[in-house]
Image (cartoon, rainbow, N blue to C red):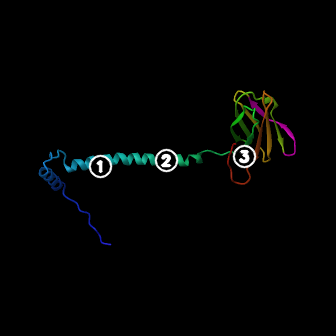
Amino acid sequence: MKNHKKYTMDAQLADSTLNNVFKACNIKIQTKSVRQIQEKHRKEAYGYWIIMITALAALLLLLISPFFFRPSPATVTTMPDQTTTAQVYQHHVEDGIFYITFSGSGIEYSRIYLMDNTGTREKILSYNAKKSTIAFPYSDKELNIFIPEDNGSVLHILLSPRKGSEVSTEQK
């Protein structure tokens, strides 16, 4: 492959050549010099470069943002009745206590109970009806959580702790 040298022309020579071409074609002679046109192009290119860097930084932040959130060490799956109005809004573990926040109304917090795989029934540690949040001790065993509502329906939640180092949250 042959090496081709890039041809460059002196700015004054390019300006006079352009003006001569305009005269020959009976076109109004350009009032801006080639240097002015090049400088304008550089300024515009610099502005686009700044926009591209900003867009790239925003895209990078968007892509790494999931790494800033700590996932819950358990999976919460709801199995609602057709008549239930309550839904799991969010959940998290803090200092060995599992917190579940609900959306909807009509939850009878004083009647909520937990049941493990052996059928042992336990009460929750606490609830806050104003914040629609319940709290119970987090353990490594699977739990069924039953949330009765005023209309007689029951929201059934299955809590399955994650095993191993893989930690994720899913809600259905």
Picture residue at 48% right of the left edge, 45% below the top: 58
Q: What secondary structure is marked by label 2?
A: helix
Mark-to-mark CA distance, 2 and 3: 30 Å
- Corner quadrant of residue 83: top right
The residue at the far bottom in this view is 1
- Answer few, some or many: residues within 10 Å of disc 2's Cα (few below 14, many 20 plus, some between 14 and 19): few
Label located before the other in sequence (1 or 2): 1
Residue 37: x and y in percent read 24, 48
Q: Amino acid at mark 3?
A: Ala
Q: What secondary structure is marked by label 3?
A: strand
Tell me if residue 8 comes above or below residue 71 in the rendering.
Answer: below
The residue at the far front in this view is 25
**Residue indicated by mark 2:** 59
Q: What secondary structure is marked by label 1?
A: helix
> In the picture, which quadrant includes the N terminus?
bottom left
**Residue indicated by mark 1:** 42
- Corner quadrant of residue 138: top right
Residue 63: x and y in percent read 54, 48
| Tag of residue 74 | 3
Label located before the other in sequence (2 or 3): 2
**Observer-nearest of 25 and 106:** 25
Picture residue at 23% right of the left edge, 62% below the top: 7
Q: Which residues are magenta?
A: 117-128
CB atoms of marks 1 and 2 within 8 Å: no
Was residue 121 drawn as part of the magenta stretch in this picture? Answer: yes
Along the horizontal axis of the image, is 132 left or right of 10? right
Q: Amino acid at mark 1?
A: Arg
- Corner quadrant of residue 51: top left
Q: Amino acid at mark 2?
A: Leu
Along the horizontal axis of the image, is 54 left or right of 1? right
CB atoms of marks 2 and 3 within 8 Å: no
